[in-house]
Image (cartoon, rainbow, N blue to C red):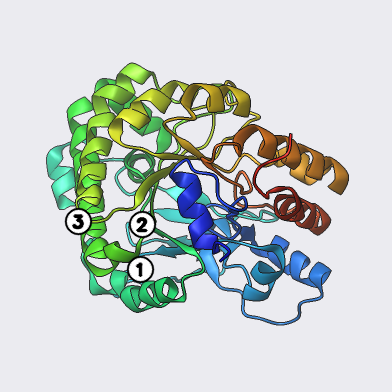
Amino acid sequence: MSMTGRDCVLAAINHEEPERLPVDFGGRHTTLHIQVHKELKRHLGIEGGEEIFRQYWLQTVEIDPRVNQRLGGDIAAFCTGAPDNWKLEVSEDRTFYDEWEAGYHMPEGSNYFDYCFHPLAKARSVQDIDDYSWPDPLNPGRFKGLRQAVKQCFEQGEKAIMLTVSPAGSWEHTWTLRGPEQALMDIIVNRDLYEEILDRTVNFQIAQWTRALEEVGEWVDVAALSDDLGTQNGPMMSPKLYRQLFKPRLTRLISAIRGMTRAKIYIHTDGSVYGFLPDLIDAGIEIINPVQKECRNMEPERLKKEFGDRLSFWGASVQTTHLEQNTPSEVAAEALSTIRTLAPGGGFVFAPIHNIQPGVPPENIVALLDTARRYGKYPIQS
């Protein structure tokens, strides 16, 4: 009896070799910008179908099931929803405010929304933090329909189930509230105020994860966290600061999740995060996404050798710029090289390095995923 996509994912993230390489195409961090999705459907001769936004500010969408069927994908991604006391309202000048009152604006000619307002940017005291209208992590709207959808997917048995909650990780969310420059300064000169915001953010996440896992924890295979910690050339902060501020809180969050589910713990963190990997592992992270191999010290060979017995790698297929600029045959060759490096022994889920952006030719997307299907049969041929 052949393995299902879910079987292949579970084997891989348990460091076993499945029948074939599992693929994430359309998961939480591996979907398409709406423009790319439309172009890919046209290329594949697929007509019609509703465009359903995954993250509106990034303009990413759910992949049409017909596209997923053609190109493959072994992950079903679920996320808690918006509270029932908030709805998306976009002004004529392409500006909107989320439930946290953070503002987003799409400049003329842009493909995305940029931050334009940080609601706690002017906070100077704990009283200011108290006076802020903190959203309710347990608002029923967040969990509406979640149990039914996840249970149905589990009973179908074909795809591994990934769950995440909104908002993003503690570092990302504190700078969403404060502004990135202010948050970085806070860490040094306003530590008490910053830690107050940080703790409230983590408590919000724990409360929402706990409630979501009460609903669906028995069916979840991958609990997906997210917190971008790197730049192209190195970490955003020193490992010392990370250990002081963020690692203990991440450990507490992971402990709460592990008390509710058998799921593997995954983190999406962009950039050069090599220096953080030992601490992430120590905190309880089991899967790292992406392997952004164009960044410093993120070479797949290095990571597989140093961390392959403790981490599974999710992503890494082809450098983002190469996916946009190279020919389909060049894309296929790089994807094959990545497979041969990371797939042996399990511990690898093949995926785009990030959501695929405008400018990537549909032919290259097809070449990427066809390579995984063609050459991803175990044992991997060198």
Q: Pointers 1 and 2 in contact (CB under 8 A)? A: yes
Numbered disc in front, either 3 or 1: 3
Q: Position of residue 309 (x, y in %)?
A: 45, 30
| Secondary element type, mark 1 | loop
**Is 52 left, or right, of 279 in this rendering?**
right
From the image, which quarter does the N terminus lie in? bottom right
Other-residue count near label 2 (Cα within 10 Å), few / some / many at <14 / 14–19 / ≥20: some
Q: Position of residue 213 (x, y in %)?
A: 26, 62
Compute the Cα span from label 3 to label 2: 12 Å
**Which residue is depicted at the point 54% across and 32% down?**
271
- Amino acid type, mark 3: Ala
Q: Quadrant of the C terminus?
A: top right
Decide which of tag 1 and tag 2 comes sooner along the chain. Answer: 1
Q: Residues within 10 Å of mark 3 (few under 14, many from 20)?
A: some
- Residue 82's disc is 1
User: Would you name the residue on which mark 3 appears?
Assistant: 207
Whole-angstrom CA distance, mark 3 to mark 1, is 15 Å
Q: Which of pointers 3 and 2 lies earlier in the amino acid sequence?
A: 2
Q: Say which of 30 and 244 sits in front.
A: 30
Query: Do the residues under discs 3 and 2 have CB atoms within 8 angstroms?
Result: no
Residue 134 visible here: no
Residue at (36% x, 31% y) in the render: 280
Mark seen at residue 97:
none
Callout 1: 10 Å neighbours few (<14), some, many (20+)? some
First-in-chain label (3 vs 1): 1
Secondary structure, mark 3, is: helix
